């Protein structure tokens, strides 16, 4: 059985991409994360983040993300994620509308782990919401 497609990242046009384009955008987002060129922000609740998260991310839960825009660099791309991509999609839309180069990790942390990507801490899990 082959792994599921890598989680696509929705970009500025927020459209559904053909599979090849989705892979390309996901690869681009992964490079941005790996090279620390993008800010990766988890908008889940604290207990969810503590259970498992993308290495090197920042945590700003949905209730506070709009209040902490000063902590997010507007000059760098930002990738938001949550458990399944719904909450992060809302954050992405709001930040994009306000002028940030914002992306949503489509499928969220569930898709991330299904693709075989690692979580922190070691043995981390995707917590229920």
Image (spheres, rainbow, N blue to C red):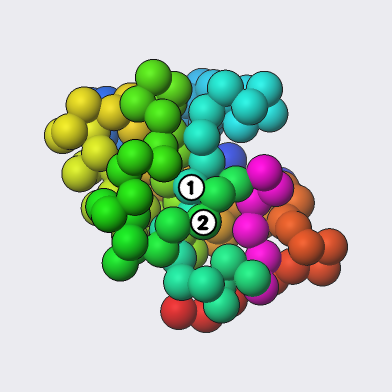
Is there CB contact under 8 Å for labels 1 and 2?
yes
Tag of residue 115: none
Q: Residue at x 41, y 41 (%)?
A: 71
Q: Residue at x 27, y 54 (%)?
A: 67
Please tell me which residue lies in front, 19 or 111: 111
Q: Position of residue 23 (x, y in %)?
A: 52, 28
Q: Position of residue 125 (x, y in %)?
A: 69, 70
Q: Residue at x 44, y 57 (%)?
A: 60
Horizontal arrangement in the rendering, residue 39 relative to residue 61 (left or right): right
Measured in 3D between alpha carbons, the distance from the residue under mark 1 to the one under mark 2, in whole angstroms, is: 6 Å
Horizontal arrangement in the rendering, residue 33 relative to residue 44 (left or right): right
Q: Residue 52 magenta-drawn?
A: yes
Q: Is residue 93 visible?
A: yes
| Residue highlighted by disc 1 | 41
| Residue highlighted by disc 2 | 59
Please tell me which residue lies in front, 47 or 24: 47
Please tell me which residue lies in front, 88 or 66: 66
Q: Position of residue 72 (x, y in %)?
A: 40, 37
For the record, the magenta segment spans 51-56
**Few, some or many C-alpha atoms within 10 Å of disc 2 (few <14, some 14-19, many ≥20)?**
many
């Amino acid at each position: 059985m082959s792994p599921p497609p890598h989680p696509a990242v929705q970009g500025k046009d927020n459209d559904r991409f053909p599979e090849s384009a989705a892979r390309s955008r996901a690869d681009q987002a992964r490079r941005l994360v790996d090279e620390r060129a993008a800010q990766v922000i988890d908008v889940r609740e604290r207990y969810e983040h503590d259970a498992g998260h993308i290495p090197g991310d920042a945590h700003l839960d949905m209730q506070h993300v709009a209040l902490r825009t000063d902590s997010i660099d507007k000059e760098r791309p930002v990738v938001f994620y949550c458990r399944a991509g719904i909450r992060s999609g809302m954050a992405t839309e709001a930040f994009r509308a306000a002028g940030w180069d914002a992306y949503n990790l489509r499928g969220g942390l569930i898709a991330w782990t299904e693709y075989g990507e690692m979580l922190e801490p070691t043995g981390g899990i995707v917590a229920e919401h």
